[in-house]
Image (cartoon, helix red, strand yellow):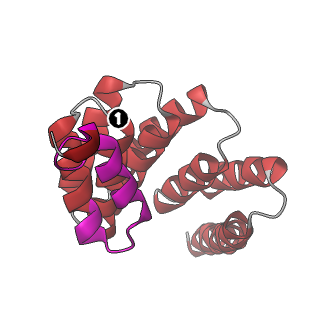
């Protein structure tokens, strides 16, 4: 114990707060790791460490962090969404869709999960389904610019897809 009864060193909460405020993903990882050394059951710290790893392109490591967060709190819609994002980044779109569905089952008004689900569907060429997801996101938040832009892109892709199908019909 130091002076005034305070333990030497930082608490898990103090490390968490440092990680939360930090901008540099490498330092975030360091701070969240120190938090988790002291409190390995902090689901939010696992999730946030995963986000920092994802920001650095370390997707497999990020997935392990999201899995730890979900082991602790399987009802964490944010961790399910973030796991979906990491799977998207790895090109594992079907698995990502399952994660977005889990997130939306927990929080049906989770705008980012609707948008991300639309993105994964778009990557699979399922543009009509993607459009429904973007519409759902915009129904919840009419000002969500990312979903507006993604919807426009999906509409363009759908038009291209339909044009190609029509062209193929005329060729054969």
Query: What quarter of the picture does the N terminus occupy?
Result: top left
Q: Is residue 35 highlighted in magenta?
A: no
Query: What quarter of the picture does the C terminus occupy?
Result: bottom right
> How far across and down, in percent of the image, does residue 92 sit?
32, 51
Q: Residue at x 63, y 48 (%)?
A: 114
Q: Which residue is mark 1?
A: 43
Camera sees residue 92: no
Q: Nearer the viewer, residue 71 or 159?
A: 71
Camera sees residue 68: yes
Q: Residue at x 70, y 71 (%)?
A: 159
Where 62 sits versus 24, above or below? above
Q: Relative to 27, is 142 on the left or the right?
A: right
Range of residues picked out in magenta: 5-28
Q: Relative to 66, is 2 on the left or the right?
A: left
Q: Is residue 10 highlighted in magenta?
A: yes
Q: Nearer the viewer, residue 166 or 43?
A: 43
Tell how many labels.
1
Q: Relative to 35, is 159 on the left or the right?
A: right
Q: Looking at the rendering, which quadrant does residue 164 occupy?
A: bottom right
Q: Nearer the viewer, residue 163 or 62?
A: 62
Q: Residue at x 75, y 46 (%)?
A: 136
Q: Nearer the viewer, residue 104 or 70?
A: 70
Where 46 sits versus 137, above or below? above
**Magenta stretch secondary structure, dominant:** helix
> How far across and down, in percent of the image, does residue 70 sit?
34, 30
Q: Residues within 10 Å of mark 1 (few under 14, many from 20)?
A: many
> How far across and down, in percent of the image, does residue 109 sit?
71, 38
């Amino acid at each position: 114990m130091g002076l005034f009864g305070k333990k030497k060193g930082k608490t898990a909460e103090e490390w968490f707060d440092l990680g939360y405020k930090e901008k540099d993903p490498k330092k975030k990882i360091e701070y969240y790791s120190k938090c988790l050394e002291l409190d390995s059951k902090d689901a939010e710290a696992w999730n946030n460490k995963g986000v920092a790893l994802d920001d650095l392109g370390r997707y497999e490591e990020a997935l392990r962090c999201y899995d730890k967060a979900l082991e602790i709190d399987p009802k964490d819609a944010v961790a399910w969404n973030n796991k979906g994002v990491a799977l998207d980044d790895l090109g594992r779109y079907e698995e990502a869709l399952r994660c977005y569905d889990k997130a939306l089952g927990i929080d049906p008004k989770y705008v980012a999960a609707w948008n991300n689900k639309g993105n994964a569907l778009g990557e699979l060429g399922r543009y009509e389904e993607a459009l429904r997801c973007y519409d759902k996101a915009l129904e919840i938040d009419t000002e969500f610019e990312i979903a507006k832009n993604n919807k426009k892109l999906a509409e363009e892709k759908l038009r291209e897809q339909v044009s190609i199908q029509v062209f193929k019909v005329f060729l054969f």
